[in-house]
Amino acid sequence: MNSHEIDYKIYGDDMQFVEIELDPNETVFAEAGAMMMMDQTIKMETIFGDGTNAGSGFMGKLFSAGKRVLTGESLFMTAFSNTGYGKAQVSFAAPYPGKIIPMDLSKLGGKLICQKDAFLCAAKGVSVGIDFRKKLSVGFFGEVM
């Protein structure tokens, strides 16, 4: 499934937030607690995982949930959908200072591996998962590529 193409603008310097403009029936999802504000026509829904069909079936979802629990990530995310007839905005911010860096997965080979808590939000259709490395030292010290 291709992801929705969303319009966004990043505000701020050290304490940044991103304002996303959703067309009617467009959806974006984010980590729980990342939403800063939303228009009246945005419908907020808690979902299990990221809402994609990756690893569909009971065992696939159970395995995915188990990996997220082991790494300390939340089992749930929040989906924000524009249910109105015009454009609507929703804004997200991280709970700590830092830079928001937009990533186009089509230009990155379709996959990006980040450290824990680096994800803020994504368009519907993007699959967010946990990646395990073979070496235990990578979990403690990171991996140089």
Image: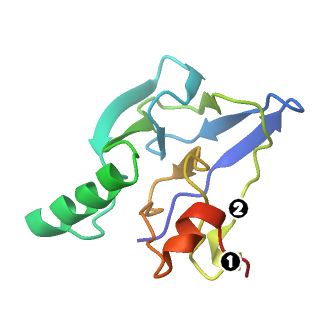
Judge the density around disc 1: few (<14), some (14-19), many (≥20) Cα neighbours within 10 Å. Answer: few
| Image quadrant assignment for residue 103 | bottom right
The residue tagged with tag 1: helix, strand or loop?
A: loop
Compared across the picture, whether 124 is left or right of 141 comes to: left
Residue 108: mark: 1
The amino acid pointed to by label 2 is: Met
**Residue visible at 25% across and 70% down?**
55
Residue 103: mark: 2
**Residue visible at 50% across and 80% down?**
135
The amino acid pointed to by label 1 is: Leu
Image quadrant in which the N terminus is located: bottom left
Compared across the picture, whether 64 is left or right of 129 comes to: left
| Image quadrant assignment for residue 77 | top left
**Can residue 46 be seen here?**
yes
Q: Please, is residue 60 above or below residue 5 in the view?
A: below
Provide residue 54's location: percent of width, then percent of height. Answer: 30, 69
